Amino acid sequence: MSKLDMLIEKLCPDGVKYKTLEDTASVELGKRVTKSEIETNPGPYPVWHGGERPMGYINKTNCPPNTVLVANTGSIGYINWINIDSWCSDAASKVIAKKDIINSRFLYHFLKSKEFKIKKYRRIGGVPTLELRKLKSFPIPLPPLPVQEEIVRILDHFTELTEDLTAKLTTELTARKQQYEYYRDQLLTFGDEVEWKALGDIAIIKNGKTYKKFGEGNIPVYGSGGVMTYIDTFVYDKPTVLIPRKGSIDKLYYLDIPFWNVDTVFYTILDENAIKAKFLFYYLKSQRLERLNTAGGVPSLTQAVLKLIQIPLPSLSEQARIVSILDKFDTLVNDISAGIPAEIEARKQQYEYYREKLLSFKELG
């Protein structure tokens, strides 16, 4: 039997009392502060508004450490834990636990577990805000403090383990990406030993067109951000490199399937006797095309600029060898890239499952 089970069996075997949130904590609206006030009174204290991140830092406080915040506007219903002196604006409510009956961190974990319900307390009409009346009447379980403290210990430990794993996996992904980019750049560095030609001499760069006159199908339509929809016809069906014209100009696509593209992305018809599409894809990725941006607003590339890019032309067999190596590196990076979100999501679901079990109490009759 676990320590928690023993505490429950000893202190609350028949269930626990429930009280409303306003009976277990003070629920106070924060105080308005403007961006100009923050700018003229800079300081070390974060200003919490209706978002999930501070809107700035100021030189005064109205919110003590170990306080739960609930967003009233913006990310309505978002539950936040504040562990340092801060400023709480009127876009959030401070929930300060009555420590003689409830542990602040226990209250945070419980409200966080019910965040999806609290987010539904959105007042309709005018500027969307949280209905504080409903928040204040939210039922809160009150197991004895030793039980609360043990639950907090378990959940905080679980949170720490999850955060540590996320940090380690993210570090590993960053290292893999750096290693991949280093070897890619080494493999794609050439001198006078190979022929060089301008991109415009080995490729025809074609504009995209609208797809809206076509019917639904299984042909992907690409824009600068990726696949937009699917239609019943294609513009090209040979290996090619798509080069965004506007927006995410560093996001290139290699395709060897039929596709359509809109006018925010170019496609290339290549001289297959001179260059392999996958080799061109990797080489252009190594050149970081975002540095060729020609616009002051939305990033843009022009055909005129692209046509002048100098491309190395080793033999087709050497191009194939380089592509094979880079494909293997790319797979290693993509495998861990896919694995990280999946692992994090699995840990999150595991945490939420146990949190729900730990924070579910039979109500004392």
Image (cartoon, helix red, strand yellow):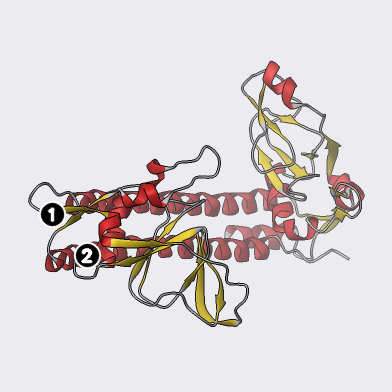
Outermost residue to the top: 40
Q: For numbered disc 1, what is the local secondary structure? A: strand
Q: Is residue 215 above or below residue 112?
A: below
Q: Quadrant of the C terminus?
A: bottom right
Q: Is residue 112 above or below residue 1?
A: above
Instruction: Name the residue tied to disc 1.
Output: 195
Q: Nearer the viewer, residue 320 or 234?
A: 234
Q: Residue visible at 43% across and 49% down?
A: 302
Q: Nearer the viewer, residue 68 or 33?
A: 33
Looking at marks 1 and 2 on the same chain, the residue that comes earlier in the sequence is marked by 1
Q: Quadrant of the N terminus?
A: bottom right
- Is residue 147 visible to the viewer in this orientation of the structure? yes
Q: For numbered disc 2, what is the local secondary structure? A: loop
Task: Answer with the quarter of the image where residue 206 lies.
Answer: bottom left
Q: Residue visible at 28% across and 58% down?
A: 282
Q: Residues within 10 Å of mark 2 (few under 14, many from 20)?
A: many
Q: Position of residue 237 (x, y in %)?
A: 39, 77
Q: Position of residue 148 (x, y in %)?
A: 69, 51
Q: Which mark is residue 259?
A: none
Asked if residue 73 lies left or right of residue 331, the reply is: right
Query: Which residue type carries mark 2?
Result: Ile
Outermost residue to the left: 193
Q: Residue visible at 12% across and 46% down?
A: 191
- Is residue 329 visible to the viewer in this orientation of the structure? no
Instruction: Name the residue tied to disc 2.
Output: 275
Q: Position of residue 176 (x, y in %)?
A: 30, 53
Task: Answer with the quarter of the image where residue 330 lies.
Answer: bottom left
